[in-house]
Image: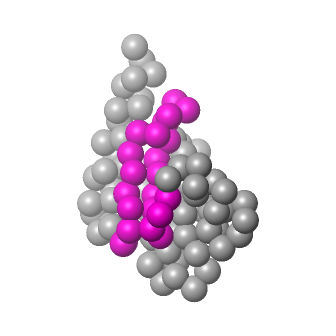
Amino acid sequence: MKIKIYGKDGCDACKQMRQKMEHGIEKWGWNGKVVLNYIDMSTVEGMAEGAFNDVFRVPTVIIEGNGAQIARYDGGVEDSRELKARLERILNDTAHQRIH
């Protein structure tokens, strides 16, 4: 599973979301299961990728599995417990899809 966080320099919510994701992935033992990428929307490359993925607000989190977008969260910072539950469901669903 790949998680992309779209953010901007100077955005406190973007910084919090990135830190929360990094901490959660480590704390919940998902290193190796989840790849986290931060896309800086302050750069030309970041704006281009954001435009390609219809990102209009930061932070935006896009979760990809099996090469396709499977979940999205636009704006704000999600509660840690809700974030963990959401990611666990996605991880379980993607693992289940690989079996069949």
Residue 27 in sight here: no
Q: Quadrant of residue 45?
A: bottom right
Number of numbered discs overlaid on the protein picture? 0
Please say whether residue 72 is one of the residues in the magenta stretch.
Answer: yes
Residue at the image point whose x is 59% and y is 49% from the top = 52
Residue lying at the far right in this picture: please name it. 44
Q: State how the image is colored.
A: one colour
Residue at the image point whose x is 58% and y is 57% from the top = 50
x and y, in percent, of residue 30 in the image: 49, 50
Residue 24 in sight here: yes
Residue interval drawn in magenta: 55-77
Of residues 93 and 40, the one nearer the viewer is 40
Residue lying at the far top in this picture: please name it. 100
Of residues 23 and 6, the one nearer the viewer is 6
x and y, in percent, of residue 89 in the image: 31, 42
Say if 31 sits above or below 13 in the image.
Answer: above
Residue at the image point whose x is 28% and y is 52% from the top = 85
In this picture, residue 85 sits left or right of residue 53: left
Residue at the image point whose x is 73% and y is 65% from the top = 44
x and y, in percent, of residue 42 in the image: 66, 73
Of residues 80 and 42, the one nearer the viewer is 42
Of residues 94 and 29, the one nearer the viewer is 94
In this picture, residue 62 sits left or right of residue 41: left
Q: Quadrant of the C terminus?
A: top left
Please say whether residue 63 is one of the residues in the magenta stretch.
Answer: yes
Say if 76 sits above or below 47 in the image.
Answer: below
Q: Quadrant of residue 97?
A: top left
